[in-house]
Image: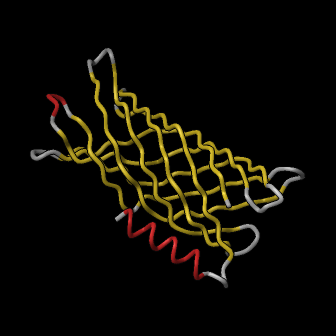
Amino acid sequence: MLPKLLLACFALTMTSSVWANTLDLNVGIRRGEVNVVDWKGTEFGFAYLFDLNDAVALGPYLTSTNWNIHNDALHVKSTGSHREFGPEIRFTAPLETLDFVAGASYSIVSKGTVETEGGQTADLALRGLRFKIGLGIPFESGAALNVFLSKGLQDVEVETANEKVKEELDEFAFTVSLSF
């Protein structure tokens, strides 16, 4: 799926003379909790946004997150990783020297794995809405360096051969992105 998505984004970049567009590369730190178990993740991703006007952009995003999952008191220690894909909308309002940036994304497709007790592997998916707010430093070249804080309203689904568990992930993230 990733190679097809990258190829589609490249094709859109080469053929979109009508629409202005933005490629946004990002790296982030995610922190959350599911039933008193800490989830700490490192996220890498990108968004390909079509500028609908000077203030609004809309397009797909794709991220990959590696998780460390632990609670020392409960003797829980695990790792996991997943990828998310879905639509993102972003609003930009210029201030004097910075841009105010806000947005939201919704993960439609999420697929990954997590290590369960006993070293077995289970399917992992995170689905739901993430809101972000931040500041951007625009450059004369048209690029921008953005810093976001985001709040996730996502559900974690872990599915083994015997059962499927769905819990709410209470999550915050700090993300830095480069848009051009």
| Coordinates of residue 117 in the picture (x, y in percent) | 18, 29
Quadrant that contains the N terminus = bottom left
| Coordinates of residue 120 in the picture (x, y in percent) | 15, 36
Residue at 79% over, 61% down? 141
Specify the farthest residue to the left: 162
Q: Quadrant of residue 53?
A: bottom right
Residue at 52% over, 37% down? 29
Specify the farthest residue to the right: 96
| Coordinates of residue 170 in the picture (x, y in percent) | 45, 38
Residue at 61% over, 63% down? 23
Specify the farthest residue to the top: 73
Numbered-mark total? 0
Give the side of residue 161 with respect to residue 131, left or right: left
Give the side of residue 96 with respect to residue 180, left or right: right
| Coordinates of residue 76 in the picture (x, y in percent) | 27, 23
Depth check, front residue: 88 or 163: 88
Quadrant that contains the C terminus = bottom right
Give the colour scheme shown: secondary structure
Depth check, front residue: 139 or 123: 139
Depth check, front residue: 2 or 33: 2
